[in-house]
Each structure stands twice: as structure tokens, then as C-alpha cells.
Image: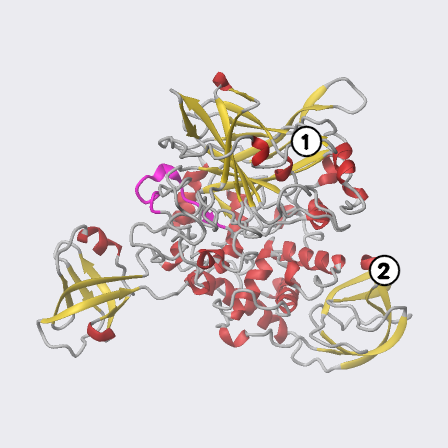
Amino acid sequence: MLNRSSLAGRLIGTSRKTGDRNAQRASQRRREARFKAEVVTLEERALLAVEMPLAPTTQFGPYDTVGNLSDVLFTGNATVGNVPVKQITFHNNTQHPIYPFLYDPNTGKSTAGGYYDPFDPHGQEFRAYIGYTEGGKDYLGLLPQHTITINVPLVFWDSGRAGIATDPTDLLPKDTNTNKDSPISNPFFFFYKNLNGTETARYVASAAQSTGDNGIVMFYHQADPAQAVDPAADAPDQLIEFTIRDKPFLSALSTKSNPIDPSQLVTLINYDVSYVDHLILPVAMEATGVPVPNTSAKADYGWIGANKRFLGVGSLQEAITRFTSDTPDNGLGNYFHGKGWPSFFNPVDRIDPTVGYRIPGGANILFASPLAGAISSYDRPFGPSNHWMLTSGGTGPIQYGLGGTFYTPNEASIASIPNLDAILKALQPGMSVNGNNGEYLGQIQSVDVAAHTVFLTTTPNVPNGTPESFVFYNPARDPYATRLTNLWYSWAAYYQKQFSTFQPEQITATVSSDSDNNNNDYRILTFGGTNHPELAVGMQVTGGGITGLTTIVKITNVNNVQQVYLSRPVPGVSAPAQLQFTFSAPQPIAYANQTTELPLSFAPGRQAFAKEFAGTVYELLSVFSTAPRQVPKLPASMEVVGNAIGGNVGFLPTAEPTDYVNISADVRDLIKSALRGVPDFNAYPESQWYPAPATETGGQNFNVFNLDPYVWFVHRELGLSGYGFSFDDDTA
């Protein structure tokens, strides 16, 4: 049951960074260097400010299954001493409860080979649930206008995460015998049992500080070997992230058998509010009471997130409601043929709007698509595995069987059963209808709920008054993923046409190394004293021993010397060399035959900009077309676009087994430019970024320069300082 929701793990949801790779990329996600000077003590805190809807509190289930906290996770030993105190403070400044919890699989490993936490089991799920005690009972949640400070155990230090849930309904399952083999009915994936039948380890401890001095934390460890399961992509929570380092303690952990990279032996905390994959809540974070270097003063540093209300006038959810509505107020115009942005299906938010709509980031439009086989984690209201994860697949069931009678010419009269009206309301035009023995009868044209009658689009050859077992089926389809894919590929086709007369050229070039991978990235071409202005990004490069698709990813000019950067190193070159290469016009992107080209046209004064922008889009698709498939159900063209929007450079052949960091950086810069709607974000001011999706451009009735409206929504409509890209967004 879990496999249906994981969707190739690293793609749907947020890809977890670990070890030194996490640290190397912190300049994009957690910006370690920015905070090193300010955050130097052992008691850094991240202050969270959120506003949550009113919801019933949830009493803890059975938890006292271990004797001490050290039975759940590592707290210290005689060799390294106690784990230093690191604290996070959650503050609820609203009139509604919130439901925060930490989670981590303890996979943080240094590139030097050592684990940041060598004591707790690796690849197993650890959590810490915020709660309080009242009337002799323990409850989940943080009450309105309350604050709680908790100590953060070592297991959460590296790439730790916290979810702040809006609704407690499914935080803990009602069945206390659940394990990973149990049918999954909710997206939080909390289990009372390990697969071997033993209890998962749980221990309730007092908070370090709390309003009313009744704050508690339930620590949890699910011990199935190397089978950590984080909350699913459709869990109704907002993600925040943090990484903690402590120089003296990590130095003690760095041994010959567990070496940690010296660059990570520092003291700091970094953090972010991540709108990378989804958005539901306005959350803010900062480090408080930080000692100011060379003084005795303390101050708050590094505020990041959303200065918005959750509900009400001018709130985040008010904006999301507009954005997801099928009305002119959504700001999308005809981008999705008048429809608003989809959301993650949640049966509670359909009943109680104060839970809030959780919307996917741009990449998850594709990777959580019905076309990828992404099934909702909820079993309500139509039973397990009977709803698509995103509303792009509709809000009704995937399939539903009802008895009744067929009446000519096109009426399916449904026999009365309990809750039939609610079921009929969920059936949607376009759903397929089968009859007895699976006979195809047509599609739903309309539904008359009061008359318990479904009208079909066809007049099947079925005798009047025939008793039928109707099966209404909602096949996988997705106009959102289709539109995005067609648009990206249309830009690539437009770029190809700019080189329709280009003839292949053979040119001798000097191959030299880029600075990464120990100066063993031989992909820079220079041409002596001659420059070749006819060469362009996206051109295919062959010869010189090159195997596999290799293109021009970047062209620079340093002191009038043209430098051409290839998308891959030239194989077999380990020292500067002169080789002959053939440069050819950009070729069709792989899987282009799966897409429908949108004809693009531009006024003369806009054509040069359009060509340059098209080159950026083309090269992104070209590079990501070399990545191996991860989601086989999703059409390959959509996976290429999803990887581009998601910035999944870790899937490129230049990332493994050897990680060519500068190639990944070049590709990320192309993505940042494309998602900002400009050819090169370094060359165009921020005032020209994030074009409005509803503006008609390029001969289309929407803005073809906007390749991901979610980015526009986060940065322009909401003005958030949290990530809007589906990867680390340095605007944040």
C-alpha cells in the first residue's frame, strides 16, 4: 500500500539532502555561510509564527512502551558525553490550535564517510510530536497563544524537518495494530507496530519550556530496518527544515571509523520555510537571542517566511482560494483554459474549509499527477485507493459501482442506497460508464441527483429497462500536466526552427577543465584566437571521443576569448588537449512526439528575446532528457519537464557516480532563468521576472514566458520570502 503513494520516492514531495551533499548545497537551500558569523552559541532557536484553523484536539494513544527517552533515541554516552542542548521554539500567535511534529530518517552522512549521528539506527523513522497535558491526559497540538520550547535530539540535527499540520484528524491512526503492511488510510504514516509485531518505541517527555508549564513531546521511533516512511505528499501540513552543527560535539564524533568532513565541524543552525513542493500555511522562522560578534549584545537574525494571516481577509488561504478557483479571479486567465490551480485532495477540507487547501508546487503538478498513477492516501469518502491525489484528476472517485436500470436512449437510473445523493454529486461529466460484463456504455454527460439519474453522452445499444451493474470510472487525465508539457516542448520546437539552415561545422578546439571534481571536468572548449559567434546554446556536439547526447550548455566571453561549456565532460581527457568536434543544429527533444506543439509568434522587437529564452528552455529539456526514468507510468515527455521544473540535477548522468558540481550549477542557473521568465536572470533585473500568466503573448491567449505559474503566485501574488521554485530558490 505504501508504494502507491511514494511515487518513486525522490520525485514526489521533497528530496531529502544528506551529509556533505546537503552542506555543499546549503548555499542554495540553507545558506550556511550567511549565518556562520551570527549564530555561534549552543542554544540557537528558530521561532515559528503561524496561524491555524480551529480543530478538535487529539488525545495521544498508548505510548508508554519504553522506560526512558534513551530507549527511543540517542541522548549521550560516557564516550562523547551528553548531546548538547539545541532548542526550537514554536509559537502559536492565533486563536486556533496547531499540530507541529519533527521527523527524520537519520541518513545524514558526510562525504568523508561518517554519519552525523552514528548512534541511532540509519534509515529508520524518528519523530517528535508537540503536545500538552490537561486533566491528567496527554493531547497533541499547541494551543492558541501558547509557546513551547523543545530540546532537539541529535537524530534530528542533519536535514531535520518539521511539519505543521492544520488538521489532527489523521495524525494518529485509530487502529493500534497498524504497521507498514496495513492498508494506508491517511497520509501521516504513523505506525503503532513494527513489521515484526513489536511496538514502535514511544516516550513522552516534558518540554524544556512552555506556556502553562504543561508542554510535552512524544518521541517516536519506528524500527523497521532501512524503511523510514515520511508523511506523504498529500499530508495537510506545511514543511519547515533545519540543519544544526556543533563544532566540539561533532569533532568528538569524527573518528577514524566515522570521519566527518572538516568543513562541517562548525557551530551553526540554518533553516528555511519550504514552499518547494506545496503550500498551505504562512510560517515564519528566525534565530532569536543570537550573540552579536565581538559584543555582549544579543539580537534576532534571519527572519524568513510569510508575514500573512492564515484565514480571513488578505490571508494566505483567501489568495489560495482565488488561485484554485475556476473563475477570472484566479489570475491565470486562459493558461489552463480558465481553470484554477489544482490542490491536493483532502476529504476534510471539502467539509471544513478552515483546514485550508494544500496546493502542489510546479513539479508536483506532474509527479503527483493522475497520469503518474498518484493515488490519494485517504480512504475517505470512497474507500482505499479510490481517489487521485490531485484535483487535476477531479474530485470524485476513481471508480464507483452502482446498481440500477438502463432506459433508452441514454439514462442510467440508479437504485437507492444509503448516501446515494452524496455519491451522485461526486460523479463528474466525462467519467466513463461500463455496464454488465464490463460493456462500455459511454461517458457521463450530466447527473440529476434528485432524480437519481445519470445521463450518458452516447445512445448505447442496450434494450430499454435492462437491469445493469453500472461502473463509473474516472480515467487518468490531466489538463494541467498536459499544458505545461506542451508549452515547454513548444519552446524547444521554436528554438529548433531558428537553426533550420545551419549546417554542421567541424572545428578544432582546446579542451580544458572546469574547476570542479578536482579540476577533472574537461568540458570547456576554446578556439585559439578565433571566436565562433555562430555557435549557440543547445547545439549538439559530437567527435573527440564523445558518447551520449552532449550539447552546449553555456557560452561565455572572458577578455574576448570565447569559452564553450559542454553539458558533459569529454570522455578520456585528463589533461588539456586539442581535439576536433562537430557542431550541429539543435535536434528534436526526446519524446517530442508525445506532445502537441503550440505555434509561437512574436513581434520583430521581441524576437531576439524570445530566441534567447527558447535556447534556455531547449537546453534544459535536452539535458534532462538524458536522465534515466524514475516514474514509468508518467509519459516520458512529462517526466523530462517535471525534472526541469523540479531542478532534479541529482538524476543527471553527470551527478552520479561522479558528481560534477559545476555542471549541476549551470543547469540550475538555466532553470532559475526559465522559471523567472527571462533568458538569463543575471542579465535581467528582478522587475522583469515572474511574468503574469494571464497576459497574452507569443500568439497565444496566455503568457508563454511563464513556465510555472506557481512561482509567479508565490513571489508576485503572495510576496513570500520562502521558496517558490520546486528546488532551492535563491530569491529566498
Which quadrant of the view contains residue 512? bottom right
Q: Which mark is residue 675?
A: none
Query: Closer to the N terminus: mark 2 or mark 1?
Result: 1
Q: Where does the image place residue 154, in percent across and percent down from the top left? A: 65, 36
Which quadrant of the view contains residue 566? bottom right
As shown in the figure, which amino acid type bears the numbered disc 1? Val
Considering only vertical position in the picture, is 325 above or below 300? Answer: below
Q: Nearer the viewer, mark 2 or mark 1?
A: 1
**Nearer to the camera, 361 or 265:** 265
Q: Dominant secondary structure of the magenta stretch?
A: loop
**Nearer to the camera, 555 or 179:** 179
Lateral position of residue 543 relative to residue 699, left or right? right
- The structure residue drawn at horizontal position 13% and vertical position 53%, both measured from the top left corner, is 450
Q: Where does the image place residue 617, in percent across and percent down from the top left? A: 62, 64
Query: Disc 1 marks which residue?
Result: 83
As shown in the figure, which amino acid type bears the numbered disc 2? Asn
Stretch of the chain drawn in magenta: 347-360
- Let me know if residue 359 is in the magenta part: yes
**Nearer to the camera, 179 or 419:** 179
- The structure residue drawn at horizontal position 78% and vertical position 32%, both measured from the top left corner, is 248
Crowding around mark 2 (Cα neighbors within 10 Å: few <14, some 14 to 19, many 20+) is few
**Secondary structure beneath disc 1?**
loop
Q: How is the image coloured?
A: secondary structure
Query: Disc 2 marks which residue?
Result: 519
**Secondary structure beneath disc 2?**
helix
For marks 2 and 1, give the CA distance.
39 Å
